[in-house]
Amino acid sequence: MRPEARARAASGEPSLEVVPCPECERPAEVVERCFLIGTDGPVEHVRIQCVDRHWFLMPAPETARTPRAA
Ligand SMILES: [Zn+2]
């Protein structure tokens, strides 16, 4: 994993992102993004692979989109 990946994700660059693995909570790299049709329309999903080689296809994390009420 290149060190600039985390900084780039933090700056909003969509190309590479690191999220915690749902299985082992180690860092997992987002390797693919796609939209799957859900009940409320297209839902962005991400395919991730963690450092322990777990693979997941799951709804994209919404950390950057969730509105925060002060
Ligand atoms: Zn894992």
Image (tube, grey):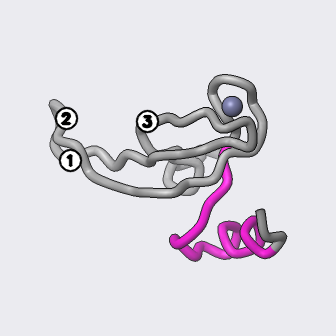
- Which residue ends up furthest to the right in the rendered image? 3
> Which mark is on residue 58?
3
- Which residue ends up furthest to the front in the rendered image? 53
Looking at the image, residue 37 lies above or below residue 31: above
Q: Secondary structure at mark 1?
A: strand
On whether residue 11 falls in the magenta region, the answer is: yes
The kind of residue tagged 2 is Gly
Looking at the image, residue 25 lies above or below residue 46: above
The residue beneath circle 2 is: 38
Q: Which residues are magenta?
A: 4-19
Q: CA distance from mark 3 to mark 1?
A: 13 Å
Q: Quadrant of the N terminus?
A: bottom right
Q: Estimate how packed mark 2 is, as few (under 14), some (14 to 19) or many (20 or more) residues with alpha carbons within 10 Å.
A: few
The kind of residue tagged 1 is Pro
Q: CA distance from mark 1 to mark 2?
A: 6 Å
Q: Sequence-wise, which precedes: disc 3 or disc 2? A: 2
Looking at the image, residue 24 lies above or below residue 46: above
State left or right for residue 44 relative to residue 18: left
Is the CB atom of the residue marked by disc 2 within 8 angstroms of ligand 1's nearest atom? no
> Which mark is on residue 42?
1
Residue 4 placement (x, y as % from top left): 78, 75
Q: Secondary structure at mark 2?
A: strand
* Residue found 17% across the figure and 41% down from its top: 37
Mark 3–mark 2 contact, CB under 8 Å? no
The kind of residue tagged 3 is Met
